[in-house]
Image: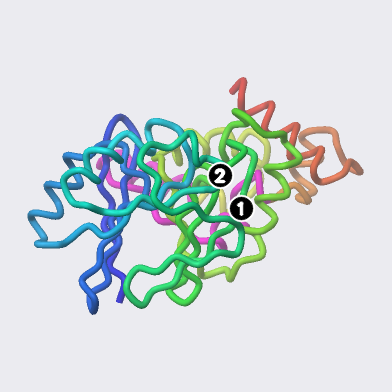
Amino acid sequence: MLETIALPVLSDNYIYLLHDTVSGETAAVDPALAQPVLMKLHEKGWRLAAILNTHHHFDHVGGNLELKAQTGCKIIASDYDRNRIPGIDVTVQEGDVVRIGEHKAKIIFTPGHTLGHIQYYFEQDKLLFCGDTLFALGCGRLFEGTAEQLWYSLQKLKAMPPDTQVYCTHEYTQNNGRFALTVEPDNMVLQERMEFVNRLRAQNLPTLPTTIAEELATNPFLREDSASIRHTLGMISDAPSDVFAKLRRLKDSY
């Protein structure tokens, strides 16, 4: 079993701890800060073996060096970011495999939010750690890449099994959902989901993980073929990537 714990930090980040109950190995995904990770490791009696970084932004790598100094863990990150992420020990590319105990994560290259962004996909465990590429009801901003790059990246995620659990790194769901309702107001599944999201956030509870199935049904950035969205945007016959690009521009100014 691969036990997963979410640590809320900063204003809306999550750090994820992954623990293989057989080998005892533990990994931290995108540690913005070191201390919350060290405290949870101490509480659990776990040993940190690795850090898995999805991209170079500071709110995903800020705890790298202190965690490495305190635990001796290895830092794994995109080969593209070899000069942009502190403390890298192992660089990975599309198709490479990372192990946490006997659990294998396939590396998926997803440029767009940044040019070196990667995902960690534990296919057998049906877990996806996607950083800032895909959010619940949203997707990442285009800080470095193009809309077309991010659209192609998201096509890889859309093709995953519907029951894949998706662990994003930010609690953006409520705001994303409000935007989603402006472009697809007649989506009943989206309306019901937002009612649930609003109840969770009213209690300060997380809305993650989500699933690929949930996102396919409600996330406008995965629904560029929706007749309703196309009607709202006045883009009935436009290419899917163009519809996506328009959605991203609208969300940027929302």
Left or right, 36 with reference to 251 = left
Q: How much space separates mark 2 and mark 1, taking CA atoms?
A: 6 Å
Which residue is painted at 48% across and 34% down in the image?
Answer: 84
Q: Is residue 208 magenta?
A: yes
Identify which residue is drawn at 66% across, 58% down. Answer: 156
What's the residue type where badge 1 is placed? Phe
Q: Residue furthest right?
A: 237
Pinpoint residue 144: horizontal percent, then vertical percent: 63, 30
Residue depicted at x 36% and y 77%: 102
Question: Does residue 144 lie above or below 100 as drawn?
Answer: above
Overall secondary structure of the magenta stretch? helix
- As displayed, is residue 95 above or below residue 172? below
Mark 1 burial class by Cα count in 10 Å: few <14, some 14-19, many 20+: many
Q: Please provide percent x and percent y for residue 238.
A: 89, 41
Residue 75: image x %, image y %?
36, 50
Residue 108 position, x and y percent, is: 58, 58
Classed neighbour count for the residue bearing mark 2: other residues with Cα under 10 Å, few (<14), some (14–19), many (≥20): many
The residue drawn where x is 28% and y is 31% is 10
CB contact under 8 Å: marks 2 and 1: yes
Residue 254 part of the magenta segment: no
Is residue 124 left or right of 160 when viewed as pictured? left
What span is colored magenta in the figure?
A: 193-222
| Label 1: element kind | strand
Q: Is residue 242 left or right of residue 120?
A: right
| Residue for badge 2 | 117
Residue denoted by label 1: 109
Q: Amino acid at mark 2?
A: His
